[in-house]
Image (tube, rainbow, N blue to C red):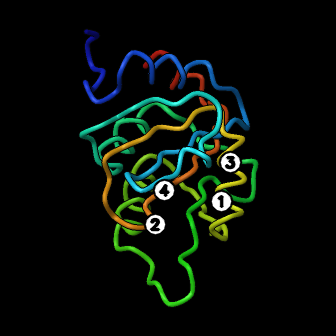
Amino acid sequence: MLKGIPPILSPDLLKVLAEMGHGDEITIADAHYPLSGAGGQIIRADGHRICDLLEAVMKYFPLDRYHEWQYALMEPVAGDTAPDIWQAYGEIIGRHEPAEATLLERFEFYGRASHSHTTIMTSETAQYANIILKKGVIVNSSEVGGN
């Protein structure tokens, strides 16, 4: 156990977040997500919802402000509607830093996610709840180590 680290962030996940470099991507996947779309290593976060995990991750994870988008969502198939959870994602991410989202067609999303550094498999049941985060750099040195 470490002080100030939420227990939802497992040791394996903390290690991954620290190892990732600028431009690396991490996919946080819902309970419906196919393993064929998973990239890199897989971390199980069974019993956890994406919003809770995203809130914990964003406290420590800088987003790539040099890229045209900082996170990607899976575009709903024709006839399906965008999930309400996307608004929550925008609010959570926005509390930590400004960010732009992009929508990727379903199979384009799977293709991109298959190249992610890591895929976190959650128990999220909202449809189209998958999200890809693109890691950036820490610009303000006071953010490093909390000093």
Give the class, few, some or many, for how many residues have Cα within 10 Å of label 1's Cα (few <14, many ≥20). Answer: many
| Mark 4 residue element | loop
Mark positioned earlier in the residue sequence (3 or 4): 3
Q: CA distance from mark 2 to mark 1?
A: 11 Å
Classed neighbour count for the residue bearing mark 4: other residues with Cα under 10 Å, few (<14), some (14–19), many (≥20): many
Check disc 4 and give the amino acid type: Asn
147 versus 109 height, above or below: above
Taking depth in this image into account, of 45 and 10 the one nearest to the observer is 45
Q: Which residue is mark 2?
A: 128
Mark with earlier residue (1, 3): 3
Which residue position holds label 1?
109
| Closer to the eye: label 1 or 3 | 1
Numbered circle sitting on residue 65: 3
Mark 3 residue element: loop
**How far from the left and from the top, in percent, is residue 49?**
29, 48
Is label 4 in contact with label 2 (beta carbons under 8 Å)? yes
Amino acid carrying mark 1 in the image: Phe
Quadrant the N terminus occupies: top left
* Most foreground residue, 10 or 32: 32
**Disc 3 from disc 4: Cα separation:** 21 Å
Sequence-wise, the earlier of marks 2 and 1 is 1
Q: Which residue is mark 4?
A: 130
Residue 38 occupies quadrant: top right
Mark 2 or mark 3, whichever is nearer to me: 2
Q: In the figure, residue 77 lies in which quadrant?
A: bottom right
Q: Are circles 2 and 1 on residues that touch, CB within 8 Å? A: no
Amino acid on which the number 2 mark rests in the picture: Tyr
